[in-house]
Image (cartoon, helix red, strand yellow):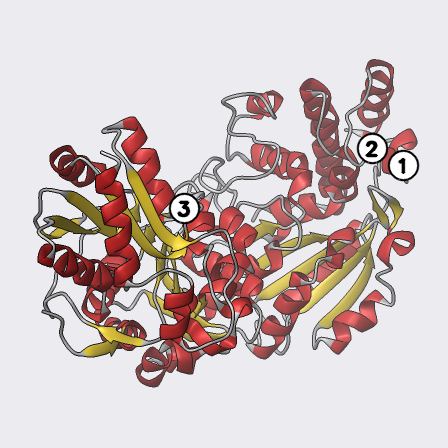
């Protein structure tokens, strides 16, 4: 889309983080932890990598984004609003009766939301369908699917992973937000995912491992994934749940709850300090 | 009055094969059962728009949703148990909620699947699909109606579920029968009892009506090939005249056609209702005819239910 410097993209990520904290605080619910870990990637996708037009959300040639980890809807809504799909003021209606900004994303309600998600483990299958349609129609759009790490415990992901390889969906990019925390705590303590890169490799995917908070690595990984001539590509980004707010970092408690008033003041202050 | 015995799935396959050239938006999917569901007929003529997902029904529905979101008209097929139960929540979130253009077409529904036994006999599929908002539920009465319904569903932009049986069974409708979503048809007029059937039970309903006629009982028979949205108007008009009702389905009486009719009657014309269907039980292995007898799904059972319904007036 537009040309932003790395510093600008990092700054946008923090603006998105501030929106997440504010909107979940206003809703007094929602999932800030996994929203904050995904913020840098979302900034890179919507403000650098993806071909899209907020004025024409159904533009035929657009790249498609599917948020499989639908509970982090706040970060998607923040990115869409900042990109210009709808007014930023609408963000404060999150989770309110009558709002388009439902607790989990809904196709058809929000401009820019491609698929309804929220029940984990389903987005990659949907993304396969979109990517397959692109191949059938000879389109060169990319389909990008962001997955949580915990949701890889859902077996359907691996059905989709096999299908993507079988159908050589080189136009499909999966991104795993590897923040290592699910509601119960450490993913490895629930049902372990490691060795995760080897799992994807054995399913026939290209695997790129990056620091999900390093904007240069993020951009390079996306370019590399987009250039893949064979096999679908997964970017496993190592992230910190709650990234950007000191007391939320690596704190599974913030998976599914908003800040309390005193926490909110601190979070806003921390984020405002780093936003240009 | 009945025609030759034909399998609905063969006519589904025939319709799909024609759609391959009639509608370039149509994509057909299957989960390793194309030879049985007859989606193979489409695959033969249009391999580039046929999608094999392997034995992975949940993935099939997710992919179907993605294809539909990209402008495709998707037909996704497998056996009834797997097409609905195995991936119900995928259908709910991916297809029904965003109202995407996916037709879930199941074969091998009902107890006449026979020897494979209860694991493969879908007797709850209408119930669970009917409960989904935005979902249309269709059970054509014979092969000709299955063909017509396939064409109509292809032209309809939205989610739908169609159930068919496995076996060859008698055709009862004209070969060029027209199908309209949500429109029931009165196949036989009568004044003493209304018999409402869906799927292959409709032919047994007609048979029951003949038995009753021999006893001097005049039965009206309705083919309720769309179970949702239910044609309440046709139903209410009929029972308003006859004063009692019987439903017949190769499905559980819980949640299926019988329930749908009970719901509609309770809000329109309250009359005695008897429901023929499986009675809160699983099926078992056996020859289809033996199973239909054992589980009370024959024309005799329908006629007996009609007598009972009339006696309760």
Quadrant the C terminus of chain B occupies: top left
Q: Is label 1 on the same chain as label 2?
A: yes
**Residue B307 at x, y percent in the picture:** 23, 47
Q: Quadrant of residue A144?
A: bottom right
Q: Which residue is mark 2?
A: A254
* Residue A159 visible (yes or no): yes
Left or right, B207 with respect to A207, comes to: left
Q: Is residue B35 above or below residue A70?
A: below
* Secondary structure found at label 2: helix
Residues at circles 1 and 2 in contact by the CB criterion of under 8 Å: yes
Residue under circle 3?
B130
Q: Nearer the viewer, residue B175 or B89?
A: B175
Instruction: Give the chain of mark 2.
Output: A
Q: Callout 3 environment at 10 Å: few (<14), some (14 to 19), or many (20+)?
A: many
Residue A259, horizontal then vertical, whole percent: 81, 22
Instruction: Tell me if residue B45 comes above or below residue A210 in the rendering.
Output: below
User: Which mark is in front, 3 or 1?
Assistant: 3
Residue A251, which numbered label?
Answer: 1
Q: Secondary structure at mark 1?
A: loop
Q: With respect to residue B261, does A169 lie above or below?
A: below
* Both marks 3 and 2 on one chain: no
- Front-lying residue, B194 or B215: B215
């Amino acid at each position: 889309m537009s040309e932003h410097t790395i510093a600008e993209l990092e700054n946008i990520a923090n603006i998105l983080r501030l929106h997440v904290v504010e909107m979940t605080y206003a809703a007094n619910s929602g999932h800030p932890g996994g929203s904050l870990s995904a913020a840098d990637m979302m900034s890179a996708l919507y403000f650098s990598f993806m071909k899209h037009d907020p004025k024409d959300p159904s533009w035929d040639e657009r790249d498609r984004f599917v948020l499989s980890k639908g509970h982090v809807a706040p970060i998607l809504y923040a990115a869409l609003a900042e990109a210009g799909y709808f007014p930023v003021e609408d963000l404060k209606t999150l989770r309110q009766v009558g709002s388009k900004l439902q607790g989990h994303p809904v196709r058809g309600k929000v401009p820019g939301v491609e698929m309804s998600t929220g029940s984990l483990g389903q987005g990659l299958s949907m993304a396969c369908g979109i990517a397959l349609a692109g191949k059938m129609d000879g389109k060169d759009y990319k389909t990008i699917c962001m997955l949580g790490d915990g949701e890889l415990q859902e077996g359907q992901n691996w059905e989709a992973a096999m299908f993507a390889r079988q159908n050589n969906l080189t136009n499909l990019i999966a991104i795993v937000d590897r923040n290592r925390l699910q509601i119960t705590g450490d993913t490895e303590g629930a049902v372990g995912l490691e060795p995760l890169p080897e799992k994807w490799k054995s399913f026939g995917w290209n695997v790129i491992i990056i620091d999900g908070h390093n904007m240069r690595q993020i951009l390079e990984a996306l370019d590399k994934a987009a250039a893949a001539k064979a096999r679908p590509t997964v970017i496993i980004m190592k992230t910190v749940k709650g990234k950007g707010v000191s007391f939320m970092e690596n704190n599974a408690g913030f998976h599914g709850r908003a800040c309390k008033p005193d926490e909110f003041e601190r979070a806003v202050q921390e984020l405002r300090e780093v936003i240009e | 009055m009945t025609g030759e015995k034909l399998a609905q799935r063969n006519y589904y396959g025939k319709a799909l094969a024609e759609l391959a050239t009639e509608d370039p938006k149509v994509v057909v999917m299957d989960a390793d059962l194309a030879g049985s569901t007859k989606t193979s007929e489409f695959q033969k003529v249009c391999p580039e728009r046929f999608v094999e997902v392997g034995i992975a029904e949940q993935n099939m529905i997710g992919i179907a949703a993605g294809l539909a979101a990209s402008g495709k008209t998707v037909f996704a097929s497998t056996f009834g148990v797997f097409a609905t139960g195995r991936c119900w929540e995928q259908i709910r979130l991916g297809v029904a909620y965003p109202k995407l253009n996916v037709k879930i077409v199941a074969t091998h529904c009902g107890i006449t699947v026979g020897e494979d036994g209860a694991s493969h006999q879908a007797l709850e599929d209408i119930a669970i699909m009917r409960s989904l908002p935005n979902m249309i539920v269709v059970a054509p009465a014979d092969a000709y109606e299955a063909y017509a319904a396939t064409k109509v569903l292809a032209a309809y932009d939205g989610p739908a579920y169609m159930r068919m049986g496995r076996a060859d069974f008698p055709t009862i409708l004209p070969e060029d029968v027209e199908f309209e979503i949500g429109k029931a048809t009165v196949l036989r007029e009568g004044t003493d009892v209304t018999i409402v059937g869906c799927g292959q039970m409709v032919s047994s309903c007609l048979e029951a009506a003949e038995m009753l006629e021999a006893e001097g009982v005049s039965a009206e028979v309705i083919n309720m090939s769309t179970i949702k949205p239910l044609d309440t108007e046709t139903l209410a008009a009929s029972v308003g005249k006859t004063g009692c009702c019987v439903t017949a389905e190769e499905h559980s009486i819980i949640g299926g056609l019988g329930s749908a009719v009970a719901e509609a009657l309770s809000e329109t014309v309250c009359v005695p209702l008897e429901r023929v269907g499986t009675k809160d039980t699983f099926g078992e292995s056996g020859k289809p005819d033996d199973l239909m007898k054992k589980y009370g799904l024959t024309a005799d059972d329908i006629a007996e239910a009609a007598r009972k319904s009339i006696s309760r007036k």
